Image (spheres, rainbow, N blue to C red):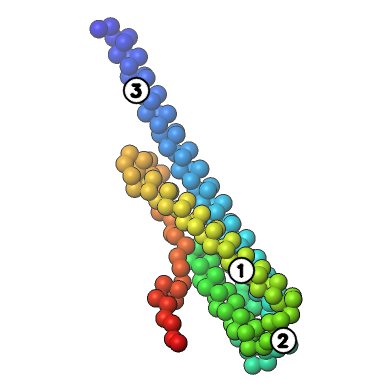
């Protein structure tokens, strides 16, 4: 065989390997962007939840003398910024859930308040925000799963190790919500 054929074969193989490396790196970058995008969606949902909690607090303020300190602390919570870790955002979401639960208890205790149209609208909005937050969490976790799988699966794991890509954390449920629900009748 002619030496030029060997050179052509080697060049073609190098181009294929180089193309695969570039393609794999681009794939990792696209996955990282999707994760960042879905994390941003969680931030948006948490912001809406925080705003809604503040509105619910002010709507129920006159009815809740003894609950005021607890709810004031909840509303004062600082929302984690974009630089916060996913664990910080998860902790903030858990604190917000406790605040919403506390306000809902107040609303249940005061029938006049519960009957107000503005409070009813806020409760409906709270349900919608919760659904949006759950959807954002599912999308985030799906993107993280795809990325984490690519990092550990051969042959893309070679590129991941070479470029030091690390696994991302999932957005997990509050420990209290993992417990089995007990009904006392």
User: What kind of element bears circle 1?
Assistant: helix
Q: Which of pointers 2 and 1 lies earlier in the amino acid sequence?
A: 2
Q: Residues within 10 Å of mark 3 (few under 14, many from 20)?
A: few
User: In screen coordinates, is 146 left or right of 52?
Assistant: left
Image location (x, y in percent) of residue 147: 43, 48
Image location (x, y in percent) of residue 165: 41, 48
Q: Which of pointers 3 and 1 lies earlier in the amino acid sequence?
A: 3
Image location (x, y in percent) of residue 16: 38, 25
What residue is at 47 percent from the left and 62 percent from the top?
171
Say which of 122 and 98 sits in front: 122
Q: CA distance from mark 3 to mark 2?
A: 77 Å
Image location (x, y in percent) of residue 145: 42, 52
User: In screen coordinates, is 36 left or right of 49?
Assistant: left
Which quadrant is the C terminus positioned in?
A: bottom left
Q: CA distance from mark 3 to mark 1?
A: 56 Å
Q: CA distance from mark 2 to mark 1?
A: 21 Å
What residue does disc 3 label?
A: 13
Say which of 143 and 169 sits in front: 143
As drawn, 26 above or below 178: above
What residue is at 65 percent from the left and 73 percent from the top?
123
The part of the image, by quadrant, that contains residue 175 is bottom left
Give the farthest residue toward the front: 185
User: In screen coordinates, is 19 left or right of 118?
Assistant: left
User: What kind of element bears circle 2?
Assistant: helix
Q: Which of pointers 3 and 2 lies earlier in the amino acid sequence?
A: 3
Q: Which mark is drawn over residue 112?
A: 2
What residue does disc 1 label?
A: 127
């Amino acid at each position: 065989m002619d030496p030029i054929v060997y050179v052509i074969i080697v060049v073609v193989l190098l181009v294929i390997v180089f193309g695969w490396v570039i393609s794999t790196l681009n794939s990792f970058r696209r996955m990282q962007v999707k994760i960042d995008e879905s994390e941003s969606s969680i931030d948006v949902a948490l912001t809406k939840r925080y705003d809604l909690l503040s509105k619910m607090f002010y709507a129920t303020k006159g009815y809740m003398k003894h609950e005021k300190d607890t709810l004031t602390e909840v509303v004062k919570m600082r929302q984690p910024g974009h630089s916060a870790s996913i664990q910080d955002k998860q902790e903030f979401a858990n604190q917000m859930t406790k605040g919403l639960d506390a306000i809902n208890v107040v609303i249940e205790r005061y029938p006049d308040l519960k009957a107000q149209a503005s409070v009813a609208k806020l409760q409906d909005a709270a349900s919608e925000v919760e659904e949006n937050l759950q959807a954002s969490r599912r999308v985030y976790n799906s993107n993280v799963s795809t990325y984490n799988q690519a990092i550990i699966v051969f042959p893309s794991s070679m590129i991941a190790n070479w470029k030091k890509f690390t696994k991302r954390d999932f957005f997990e449920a509050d420990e209290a919500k993992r417990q089995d629900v007990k009904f006392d009748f």
